[in-house]
Amino acid sequence: MSQNIENLEFDALLDEFKKVIKDEGLKYTQQREALLRVLYNSSCHFTPENLYLKIKDKYPELNIGIATVYRTLNLLEDAKMVTSVSFGTQGKKFELATKPHHDHLICKECGKIVEFQDQMIEKKQMSIAKENGFILTGHMMQLYGICSDCNKKMKR
């Protein structure tokens, strides 16, 4: 993807974010923009703590607190601009919601997340919803197990 197209996409996302902030009666800040920019430029799933550390590393001149990260992620999730994968007592990991639909394989040992798409699963879900009189408006599939790396370590 060219740098120009990436900038246009980020600018549109930033405009949407600024509108959400304004609608909530909040102040637009460089810290909030930095958070959005780090999420946009990464394919990772972040815990709030990981995201905080990444922002501090990438933008050392910014004074950002962990509370700002939590509040901004909650705001973005409420606005459906980010999605989260829950890890129970271990908390949530976040990613931008602009990615095409996908599901997740999650390692219960190391927390590794693998994204996947499967058209047969998507069709089956639609069929199940229809059979039960549901109009499917969305879903999130999370499959839990042990990744190949952890499996190898366990067998040593």
Image: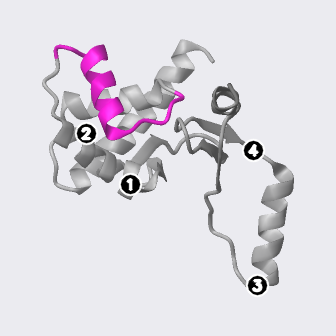
Q: Is residue 117 left or right of residue 99?
A: right
Residue bearing the label numbered 3: 132
**Residue type of the residue flagged with mark 4:** Gln
Where does the image place residue 54, in percent across and percent down from the top left? 33, 23
Give above or below for 77 relative to 93. below
The part of the chain drawn in magenta is 43-61
Question: Was residue 28 drawn as part of the magenta stretch in this picture?
Answer: no
Residue that appears at 60% across and 44% down: 106
- Amino acid at circle 2: Val
Comes first in the chain, label 1 or label 3: 1
Residue at disc 2, secondary structure: helix
Q: Which residue is mark 4?
A: 117
Q: In the rendered structure, are the residues bearing label 2 and label 4 in contact, judged by CB atoms less than 8 Å apart?
A: no
* Residue drawn 75% across the image and 44% down it: 117
Label located before the other in sequence (4 or 3):
4
Q: Which residue is mark 1?
A: 89
Residue 53 lies in magenta, yes or no? yes
Q: Return the residue at label 2.
A: 69
Labels 1 and 3 touching (C-beta < 8 A) = no
Q: Secondary structure at mark 3?
A: loop
